[in-house]
């Protein structure tokens, strides 16, 4: 079934089909791949009274094997390659500082190729053939949902570094990117406070944009509003003249953009070519960060808004060190951004949990991870005791002419993750939708 055909199905049926496709992956052949200043410290909450049993630990070795699984090719490589780079940086720093429990980290790298069945196939290969202790990877929600049943069936552990649409928890996933109440919901609240009332919703045609816009529509309805337009295009789509014509006709005062991958390059270039400026019609994006701005061209997106939890310009001592280390390893022309930072600190959170547990045993690591804190480049993050998401500060910024982002608003303190939006009256019924 095509992306477009899949997207026309009800949300729950699409999720079921994606999960079913992932469970069928054992019938497919798998392929292989590999690679590999002192690090900041993490602090842990008091140890839990007991730790549940899990699968037997791997045979004693001088190394701990981990997997990195991102799209290094295809439409999503514009975003994911840099997250892969950040995870390698963290591993290099940890190894240089003595490793994990005195053992060096050995890395096995796989390419998800911007294709969610491939993510499921490679995840199974990493767990069953390579026997890695943890996997750091994914970007799109489609890739995550394809991998989820693989990790649960194989008692594996995934650290997922990207903001997403919420309405999910898995005992085998740690979510280091934002959930909905840490990005999308506060972004809408900010726009409403700024007097925006006519929202046009534009997204790529898969799980994250459609579920996010379902939530946005409920939030707008609670404010007595409804979107003036809603449009989806396939991942990798590059022709936006018709969409831009529809946007003009709807006459919105803001576009809420959930496009992913290199579709953003085409959209913003064509938006500028159509003579639409950020002053005339601002766009707020939740999947466009500094890395994507580099591909889009700052001249095509300057003045538009983005909502994240970290910017390269975030002012913390940890971020000064992080940006310097990233540029030293990969080049002065490289930038950091939110998913890059979340991928980076996810490796450190895993290290802290393993060392607290004294083992890479999955159940022990999950128990030990509860309440662990880390001084990340974007500020202190804390693993939630129950849902395995992290508390994060919310930030909204404006894209500058040089491609960097000026923060114009933040939440003041880390926001506790609420993936099912249980604390919002207008979100009643969303948890049931996700079942």
Image (spheres, rainbow, N blue to C red):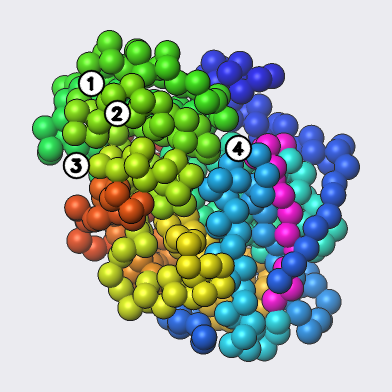
* CB contact under 8 Å: marks 2 and 1: yes
Marks 4/2: CA distance? 22 Å
Q: Residue at x 45, y 35 (%)?
A: 264
Please tell me which residue lies in front, 269 or 94.
269
What is the CA distance from the residue labelled 4 to the residue labelled 3? 31 Å
In this view, the residue in front, 128 or 238, is: 238
The residue wearing badge 1 is: 252
Badge 2 is on which residue?
255
Mark 1 or mark 4, earlier in chain = 4
Is residue 111 located in the magenta-colored stretch of the structure? yes
User: Which residue is disc 3 drawn over?
Assistant: 190
Q: Which is more N-terminal, label 3 or label 4?
A: 4
Crowd class of label 3 (few under 14; some 14 to 19; many from 20; radius 10 Å):
some
The residue at which mark 4 appears reads as: 75
- Point 60% across, 53% down: residue: 81
Q: Position of residue 64 (x, y in %)?
A: 73, 75
Image point (78%, 69%), residue name? 56
Label 4 environment density (alpha carbons within 10 Å; few <14, some 14–19, many ≥20): some
Instruction: Give the crowd class for mark 2: few <14, some 14-19, many >=20 residues within 10 Å.
Output: many
Q: Nearer the viewer, mark 3 or mark 1?
A: 1
Alpha carbon of mark 2 to alpha carbon of mark 1: how far?
7 Å
Dot 1 alpha-carbon crowd within 10 angstroms: few under 14, some 14 to 19, many 20 or more: some
Q: Is residue 374 magenta?
A: no
> With 55 as the anchor, is 341 left or right in this view?
left
């Amino acid at each position: 079934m095509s992306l477009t055909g899949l997207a026309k199905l009800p949300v729950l049926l699409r999720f079921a089909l994606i999960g079913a496709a992932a469970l069928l992956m054992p019938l497919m052949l798998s392929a292989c791949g590999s690679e590999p200043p002192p690090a900041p410290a993490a602090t842990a909450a008091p140890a839990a009274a007991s730790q549940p049993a899990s699968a037997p630990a791997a045979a004693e070795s001088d190394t701990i094997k981990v997997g990195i699984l991102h799209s290094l090719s295809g439409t999503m490589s514009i975003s994911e390659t840099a997250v892969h780079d950040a995870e390698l940086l963290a591993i290099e720093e940890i190894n240089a500082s003595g490793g994990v429990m005195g053992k060096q980290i050995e890395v096995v790298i796989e390419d998800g190729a911007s294709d969610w069945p491939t993510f499921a196939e490679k995840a199974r290969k990493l767990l069953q053939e390579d026997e890695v202790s943890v996997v750091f990877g994914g970007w799109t929600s489609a890739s995550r949902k394809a991998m989820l049943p693989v990790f649960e069936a194989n008692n594996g552990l995934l650290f997922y570094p990207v903001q997403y649409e919420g309405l999910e928890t898995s005992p085998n996933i740690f979510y280091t990117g934002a959930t909905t109440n840490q990005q999308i919901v506060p972004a809408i609240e900010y726009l409403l406070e700024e007097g925006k009332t006519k929202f046009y919703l534009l997204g790529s045609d898969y799980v994250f944009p459609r579920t996010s816009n379902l939530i946005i529509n409920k939030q707008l309805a609670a404010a007595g509003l409804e979107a003036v337009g809603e449009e989806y295009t396939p991942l990798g789509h590059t022709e936006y003249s018709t969409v831009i014509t529809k946007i003009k006709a709807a006459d919105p005062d803001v576009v809420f953009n959930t496009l992913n991958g290199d579709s953003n390059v085409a959209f913003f270039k064509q938006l500028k070519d159509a003579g639409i400026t950020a002053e005339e019609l601002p766009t707020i994006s939740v999947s466009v960060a500094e890395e994507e701005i580099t591909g889009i061209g700052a001249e095509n997106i300057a003045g538009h808004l983005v909502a994240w939890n970290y910017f390269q310009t975030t002012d913390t001592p940890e971020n000064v060190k992080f940006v310097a280390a990233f540029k030293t390893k990969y080049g002065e022309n490289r930038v950091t951004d939110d998913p890059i930072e979340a991928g980076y600190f996810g490796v450190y959170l895993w290290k802290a949990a393993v060392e607290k547990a004294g083992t890479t045993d999955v159940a022990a690591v999950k128990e030990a991870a509860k309440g662990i804190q880390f001084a990340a480049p974007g500020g202190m993050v804390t693993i939630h005791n129950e849902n395995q998401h992290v508390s994060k500060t919310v930030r909204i910024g404006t894209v500058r002419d040089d491609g960097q982002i000026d923060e114009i608003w933040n939440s003041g303190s880390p926001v506790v993750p609420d993936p099912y939006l249980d604390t919002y009256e207008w979100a009643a019924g969303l948890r049931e939708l996700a079942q």
